[in-house]
Amino acid sequence: MSSHREAPEIAKDPVADGTDVYAFVSPKRPDSVTLIANFIPLQQPDGGPNFYEFGDDVRYEIHVANKGHATADITYRFQFTTTIRDPKTFLYNTGQITDISDTTWNRPQTYTVTMIQNGNARVLARNLKCPPVNVGTRSTPDYAKLSAQAVHDMGSRKVFAGQRADAFHVDLGSIFDLGALRPFNDVHLISMPVMNGVNAVQSYNVHSIALQVPIKELTRNHDMPTHQSHPGAVIGVWATASRRKSRIFDNETGTYVKTGPWEQVSRLANPLFNEVIVPMAEKDEWNARPPSGDSRYAKYVNHPELAGLLPVLYPGVFPNLQAYTKARADLHAILLTGIPRGVVRGFQNYTGPVEADLLRLNVAIPPSASPNNLGVVGGDLAGFPNGRRVDDDVVTIELRAIAGLTIPLVDTYTPDGAAAAIDDGTTNTNAAARVYFPYLGLPGGGYQTMPGTTQAS
Amino acid sequence: MDDTSRRRFLAVAGAGVAAGTVAVTTGTASAAEASRKPDAAKESVVAYIKDHRSTELRLLVGEREVIVRDRDLVNRILNAAGGN
């Protein structure tokens, strides 16, 4: 998936597992950027009585680099506090929750937002309320109201932290079954009948941190670039989660004692980077490293394993890709440096020669009036890999790029016909995105959401 | 505490605690016994010797990690931790 359970260690620690990062110029407020970092993957809406929540023992951060060195020039830090109102009950809620402050919510969460810049930490807000999870029709009868109450103003910024519907769509069941894409089942090495893709993420929730910030707060010179070639127009974004270095189980209290400095355990910028590019044995280390040291992973971008697998899994379908043995300068630019001027007309999101996995957003490119969810590949310069919008179909974009569709941007090459057609056959069947902040759809409710079906053979 | 009496102490201590956990008293007061300084840590501390062949000890306290290089201290901890 984008980054759901993408590495062995973090797959065992879902509360700290970053799943997706989004960064885009806000459609309704184009003088601002919306940054979204999702955590805690694949939440069943009915996962009670101990429903999903942010970890009090996890430090969640969204970082922005604006000087080309791929280190954080601005960090927004989110730290959560959970309270038990009534320690005598096992219930998450002791009655209907019709207001975010209702005392019937037995396990409220609040959070503090801190901005770190130039080595100085400044608390932007304290005791901001999260919404409860969407328990069900009886417990949370007007979830849209609870969600709206959890959108907070912080001066010229907006912030939200709480449960949302996942917006990512992908056919996990097929892709991780020997690289199968159901629409192309008939030409797979192990041939099967063609069928539509199955969106494996549909109906699952995540926990989302969304922040809307004036562009001037994020750019190098605190200005508002008006042309895409402006030297300070591109920002690099990534999100991390950190835990204390030591965690010791205290069997007298049944809880963990945490000690020591915060250590990064999860990192995410471009979707699928750690998941698909980095080999399994290096994924955990990648999660603990800063993006500024990503040059060690450049060899996996330049010669991605998946590009070698496609011609094997789909014999005869990708002959040109199979014959292309040069380093993939197109992927290197898209994922590690940004696309320099002159490659795509009217566009650049180059941040300099430092190789780093960053979600690079050119803030001078205004939101698209008619978004194309294939982003830059589809001719829409306001979409991925110019940042990432909630509805961007990053699986298709990255599949086609790896299949060779973007090689002609940097080299003389004729893509295989399949490169422009390849996809996993899924469409966005998740909850509809909202047109306003925090953009991600409302989370599915525990009572209302029906589990899927299962088959052993 | 010599090795024989130390083993005896561990056997007694082990009888009263959960399997895998022992309580150790390492020696009685001596001329080398340290006293607490005013700025000594006043909270839980985790000591971590990553490599038993080194002289490095990592102390986790609050949100800090203090790296100490002290062969004698490391040896005393390793001695206390081993040999049961």
Image (spheres, rainbow, N blue to C red):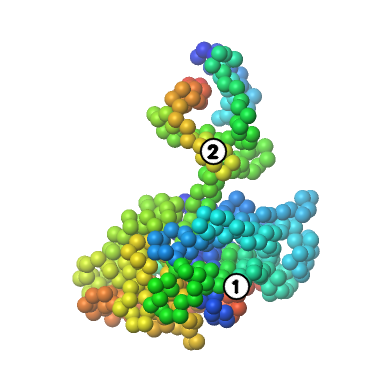
Residue drawn where x is 57% and y is 13% of the image: B30
- In the image, residue A148 above or below residue A265: below
Task: Tell me, yes or no, if residue A271 can be seen here.
Answer: no
**Residue position for label 2:** B60
**Residue position for label 1:** A438
| Number of numbered discs | 2
Q: Name the chain letter of the residue that bears numbered label 1.
A: A
A75 vs A85, nearest the viewer = A75
Residue type at numbered disc 1: Pro
Residue drawn where x is 56% and y is 70% of the image: A213
**Mark pair 1, 2: CA separation:** 38 Å
Task: Tell me, yes or no, if residue A367 can be seen here.
Answer: yes
Q: Position of residue A141 (x, y in %)?
A: 74, 72
Q: Position of residue A26 (x, y in %)?
A: 54, 77
Is residue A183 shown left or right of residue A23? Answer: left
Screen quadrant of the N terminus of chain B? top right
